[in-house]
């Protein structure tokens, strides 16, 4: 059996020398190296920015979405959307564990991989069902987890689809838990979406009674979804591509103080400036959205003379899976909503 690198560099075909995530093409031969784990995949949870883009490209046609997805994997050996660069994650059952793999996985374990599909060797034999509303795709296929790849064993106290959808965005509520301090004013843009709802819950919990949490939804529907769960202090629906409009609205709701923390959970482009303008000087903008442009954020902030800390939405922070599943255990209302929408 061949020896593998912990980071999976042995699978990179092109360009040579890079890690699997930035690679254009990786080897998706399902014969494992000595430190790899082979997974029988059940469901892919395609990243929202990626799925939205594929759906648009396919004109909403499910057969066309299937073709695009199969095409991406055939070409790249992984599901890295070439237009957004993002992936998603998967759930499945461990089929084989390499003899040199260090960890407690064994065949038969049901897991969710917490590393991106944009770096995961994947073979799709067949796509059975696409659920466009929740970006989930049931397949027959296999995937490889590298030694360094993080995962969560699926909890047995909630349905798999529910855990999958929450774990997909686990970095967001966990980062929110770490960023928000008592008394903070927090704005969550895209607050009625999947990651947004989890962030609102954590923000409200951490900001406490002296803090203020403002939910900005993309439409009245998602705004009302958050409102029905009483997850924030203020709610409004607004198009976050309108930066100045957002600034005026947040000025009004904060008595001209603006926000200490702005969390961007949208799935479309061109919302960097609304996030930056809503934040006070020395405040923090956390860009969880994969549709964020580093160039637009950095040059845009400079262009308006805003001294804000900007955090790239690392999908991982320590304890992120536990923190996120705990939210669903703590909040019955949120769990019910997630079960209804995603399970
Ligand atoms: P989601 O459930 O689809 O939520 C996105 C939200 O954005 C929706 O509620 C939508 O509101 C709102 N929105 C859309 N257009 C808007 C606009 N013009 N103004 C204001 N809000 C708008 O997505 P998600 O699963 O939470 O994911 C959110 C983002 O996180 C995506 O970009 C995804 O790719 C990214 N992500 C990042 C990581 C990471 O590791 N950093 C991991 C997973 C996902 P309506 O529903 O009302 O339209």
Image (tube, helix red, strand yellow):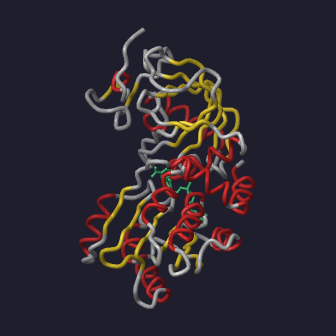
Residue 28 falls left or right of residue 234: left
Q: Residue at x 56, y 48 (%)?
A: 322
164 or 155: nearer the viewer? 155
In this view, 77 is above or below 166: above
Q: Residue at x 38, y 29 (%)?
A: 25
- Quarter of the picture containing the N terminus is top left
In this view, 85 is above or below 28: below
In this view, 280 is above or below 15: below
Q: Residue at x 45, y 68 (%)?
A: 180
Q: Quadrant of residue 299?
A: bottom left
261 or 76: nearer the viewer? 261
Residue 293 falls left or right of residue 31: left
What percent of the width, then of the height, locates residue 334? 68, 61
What percent of the width, then of the height, locates residue 212? 52, 79
What percent of the width, then of the height, locates residue 96? 56, 18
Q: Residue at x 50, y 49 (%)?
A: 320
In this view, 157 is above or below 4: below
210 or 121: nearer the viewer? 210
263 or 12: nearer the viewer? 263
Q: Quadrant of residue 85?
A: top left
Q: How many marks?
A: 0
What percent of the width, then of the height, locates residue 71? 51, 32
């Amino acid at each position: 059996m061949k020896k593998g690198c912990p980071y999976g560099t042995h699978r990179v075909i092109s360009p040579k020398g890079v890690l699997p995530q930035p690679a254009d093409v990786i080897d998706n031969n399902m014969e494992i190296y000595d430190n790899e784990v082979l997974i029988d995949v059940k469901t892919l949870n395609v990243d929202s920015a990626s799925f939205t883009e594929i759906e648009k490209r396919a004109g909403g046609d499910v057969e066309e979405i299937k073709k695009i997805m199969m095409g991406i994997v055939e070409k790249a050996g992984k599901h890295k959307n070439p237009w957004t660069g993002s992936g998603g994650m998967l759930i499945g059952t461990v089929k084989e564990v390499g003899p040199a793999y260090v960890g407690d996985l064994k065949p038969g374990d049901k897991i969710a991989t917490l590393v991106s599909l944009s770096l995961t060797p994947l073979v799709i034999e067949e796509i059975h069902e696409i659920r466009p509303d929740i970006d989930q795709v049931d397949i027959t296929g296999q995937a490889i987890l590298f030694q360094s790849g993080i995962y969560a064993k699926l909890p047995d106290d909630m349905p798999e689809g529910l855990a999958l959808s929450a774990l997909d965005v686990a970095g967001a509520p966990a980062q929110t838990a770490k960023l928000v301090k008592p008394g903070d004013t927090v704005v969550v843009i895209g607050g009625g979406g999947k990651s947004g709802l989890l962030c609102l819950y954590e923000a409200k919990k951490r900001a406490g009674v002296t803090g203020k949490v403002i939910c900005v939804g993309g439409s009245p529907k998602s705004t009302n979804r958050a409102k029905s769960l009483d997850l924030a202090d203020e709610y409004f629906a607004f198009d976050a591509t309108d930066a100045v409009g957002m600034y005026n609205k947040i000025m009004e709701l904060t008595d001209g103080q603006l926000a200490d923390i702005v969390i961007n959970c949208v799935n479309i482009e061109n919302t960097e400036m609304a996030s930056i303008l809503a934040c006070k000087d020395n405040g923090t903008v956390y860009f969880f959205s994969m549709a964020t442009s580093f160039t637009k954020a950095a040059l845009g902030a400079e262009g308006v003379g805003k001294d804000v800390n900007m955090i790239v939405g690392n999908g991982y922070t320590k304890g992120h899976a536990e923190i996120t599943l705990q939210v669903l255990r703590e909040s019955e209302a949120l769990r019910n909503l997630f079960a209804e929408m995603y399970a």
